[in-house]
Amino acid sequence: MPQVYENEIVYDYPPAHSLLWLMRKYPNPQSPQVFSVDTLSRTMDPDTGVIRSERVLGIQQGAPRWITKLFSLPETTYVREVIFIDPAKDQAIMMSMNLDLAQYINVLEYITYTPFPREKGAAAPSTLFKQHALMHSAFPTRMIARRIEKASVDRFKANAENGRKGFDWVLQKGLELGGNGAGNGNEALA
């Protein structure tokens, strides 16, 4: 039975600011496991203004010891991420999936960033982050498949908390830099 992880976070930043800095989420000091981000393509639909970015993230983190011993796993894994940013609606949709280790576990993630109303009288809305991830192992031995799925959910949960802290850090740095996204890349955030 596939495992599901769901998460909601309200970032106390306007959606336009959150979306501007979304593409600079990595690297950040809270998510050191993400060691590379390679943009494969970035296009804009001339009719809708929607920006589509496709990236590959390099992730280096240890799997639980029993999994590493059993399968001789590599330390580095890769994730494909596709993001659709709609500036007119101040929202984004992000989908990701693992590119390797699929013979052991498939992880599919769906994330949305949407405006979230603040309390009455607030000048600007906040940003609502909704995350839904599905982990499914088709490993032939069901007992091992369930353990792989559970270990994946546990790791995902820990990484989600680090991701929240990391994106908060990036958003704050964005404000400190003037919030305009100027610069050549993430080096401005360090």
Image: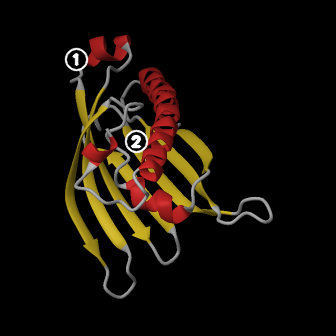
Q: In what quadrant of the picture does the C terminus appear?
A: top left
Residue 46 sits in quarter:
bottom left
Residue at (42% x, 47% y) in the render: 108
Query: Do the residues under discs 2 and 1 have CB atoms within 8 angstroms?
Result: no
Q: Which residue type carries mark 2? A: Val
Helix, strand or loop at disc 2?
A: strand
Picture coordinates of residue 77, whole percent (x, y): 25, 34
Circle 1 Cα neighbour tier, 10 Å, few/some/many (<14 / 14–19 / ≥20): few
Picture coordinates of residue 80, whole percent (x, y): 29, 49
| CA separation in Å, label 2 and label 1 | 19 Å
Q: Is residue 16 above or below residue 178?
A: below
Circle 2 Cα neighbour tier, 10 Å, few/some/many (<14 / 14–19 / ≥20): many
Helix, strand or loop at disc 1?
A: loop
Residue at (38% x, 16% y) in the render: 64
Q: Which residue is mark 1?
A: 72
Picture coordinates of residue 172, whole percent (x, y): 49, 45
Q: Which residue is mark 2?
A: 107
Q: Which residue type carries mark 1? A: Ser
Residue at (38% x, 47% y) in the render: 25
Q: Is residue 142 above or below residue 175?
A: above
Q: Is residue 185 left or right of residue 170?
A: left
Residue 116 sits in quarter:
bottom right
How many numbered circles are shown?
2
